[in-house]
Amino acid sequence: MYVAVKGGEKAIAAAHRLLARERRGAPEIAEISLDQIREQLSLSVDRVMSEGALYDEDCAALAVKQARGDLVEAVFLLRAYRTTLPRFGYSQPADSSRMHVRRRISATFKDVPGGQVLGPTFDYTHRLLDWSLAGEGKEAGTEESSGGDSGVGVPSPMPRVLDVLGREGIIESEGSGDDHEPADLTRQPLDLPAGRDVRLQNLARADEGFLLAMGYSSQRGFGSTHPFVGEIRMGEVEIEFVPEELGFPVTIGEITLTECETVNQFIGSGEARFTRGYGLTFGQGERKAMSMALVDRALRAPELGEEKKGPAQDAEFVLYHSDNVEASGFVQHLKLPHYVDFQSELVLVRGLRRTVREEESGHDI
Amino acid sequence: MTSETMPGYNYAYLDEQTKAMIRRAILKAVAIPGHQVPFGSREMPLPYGWGTGGIQITASIIGPEDVLKVIDQGSDDTTNAVSIRSFFAKTAGVATTTRTEEATVIQTRHRIPETHLTDGQIIVYQVPIPEPLRFMEPSESETRTMHALEEYGVMHVKLYEDIAEHGRIAKSYDYPVRVEGRYVMAPSPIPKFDNPKMHDSLALQLFGAGREKRIYAIPPHTRVESLDFEDHPFEIQKWDYACAICGARDSFLDEIITDDRGGRMFVCSDSDHCARRVGEDS
């Protein structure tokens, strides 16, 4: 006789033990430490902090380790931790013009005040596997003689390129510094139409791959916005907070940010001026910051009187599908049992087939 | 209140401000039966799409005196039901049960128990897509307007097209209902077999969609009608078989494939109902 499957609890516990064993890998190989992840897989840590919306390198490194290197799973771990944290308040707006710049380039001007600073970038590396990294011991490129000068001589603060254009009035002014408190998607659900503050917060938390594809699609004609990279900068910015009992800002720490500002197609016939797109990530996240700037600009189509021609310009499409914690959960929920729904469909389809067969045999007689 | 069994976290995981926010949304939902109320859904330690809406509602209403039952596909033993039950046992130290009538709070995915719910019980549904009009109109701004204007023509057209094409309404689960003559509502993907149980129920019915950030409700003694036409009245699924374990002919049956030569059997989807009928202590 059939016995209904029981023992889900035991099965789950066994699965978790197997998972822990797989995560550890071969026991004769040394266990990876959080320090190693933080220092040597720093771009994984940066991505997890960005999409996990929590700047904490140690927690992000732990999440990467616990998730066996699955970054979307690590983002989920960090988000679920973040949501339990009490809120003391909101920091002052970070001022990226006062960034201690480690990388800064502009594609719109050959030279800019402060100069072009390549910094630590994959750009211009030849993507050849470097076998010297395979063995342990001395790696190429880390010797003092061949190393960079780690930012010595980079002026700080460094003026932002788009501010130079801004002074000429040839580019639209940066968002009006109106007084309205920025919305917070982690407290209030998305409401449409969404203001730019909401859109930017959504994009900052969005999946990098999703933004990359959306930005890319806008370049290929599904809502072209003709971007130029006005500036990309990466470096450290001080975060200030005003404690109620003091009433003046105090520095509470320093975080690494990557910022991308694009200069886009102009508007207006009389007083023509360029428009802007903006992207910002925690850590070093240039691909995402650039994609975000493209999508931010694409989403401004209605505001700038442009015809909507592509998904990247459709705020509802982009904002509702950008979050990888939401998307990953819902796609993967299909693994859960659906016996009841499927049984309902079976009953329906069998019924429909029977009706057709009965009608057909009725005709024969 | 802190959790005795999970140090470092608040009782039932959510902080008290979040619970208060969710309770406000629930109160509004109860006041406007069938209307979807947006709420500040939080990230939970379980994935979106796996019951986060239901879990947030349960976490907001549960107390130490409550007795919790969690089912998925009608059964207390499916893995996700086990996982959610152990989450609340861990974070809220709450007593759990598989017996429908012993529970004060029942969290469910895809079924309503066969045992009639009674006065004072709360059933919490996990909802994947709260918008009944979604597959006719993908835009949320549009569907919100349609609900506001009570513009449900597309739904009737969809059901009519089914009749024109298949001779009957080809919707077997998540079958749309109209609540107290006003809002068209998605009952969550329960089989239409369960739809009549929502009507004039003694229990409070709460619906949580975490990923879509919506809560809605059906208060006790509310009129819930499954949409239909006069010449094509709503009807529920029937089986030519009885449950192979308890012999029930009036319960929703799951089909079990027993071999690879077409052998199959039918058993109750509600495992508590079935076990009790054969006198087994589930």
Image (cartoon, helix red, strand yellow):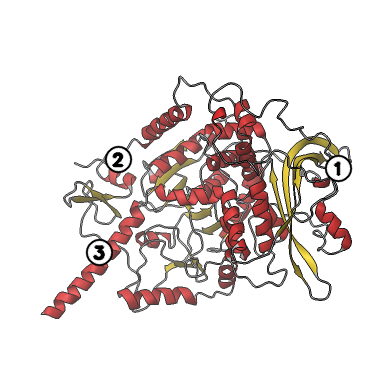
**x and y percent of residue B24 in the render?**
63, 53
Q: Can residue B104 be seen in this view?
A: yes
- Front position among marks 3 and 1: 1
**x and y percent of residue B235 in the render?**
32, 68
- Front position among marks 3 and 2: 3
Q: In which quarter of the image is the N terminus of chain A?
A: top left
What residue is pinned by disc 2? A5
Question: Could you confirm whether marks 2 and 1 are on the same chain?
Answer: yes
Q: In this rendering, is residue B258 above or below A140?
A: below
What residue is pinned by disc 1? A157
Q: Is residue B128 left or right of residue A314?
A: left
Question: Could you confirm whether marks 3 and 2 are on the same chain?
Answer: yes
Q: What residue type is labelled 2?
A: Val
Whole-angstrom CA distance, mark 2 to mark 1, is 66 Å
* Sequence order check, earlier mark of 3 and 2: 2
**x and y percent of residue A51 in the render?**
62, 45
Give the quadrant of residue A340: bottom left
SS of the residue under disc 1? loop
What residue is pinned by disc 3? A350
Q: What residue type is labelled 3?
A: Arg
Q: Mark 2 falls within which chain?
A: A
Whole-angstrom CA distance, mark 3 to mark 2, is 26 Å
Q: What residue type is labelled 1?
A: Pro
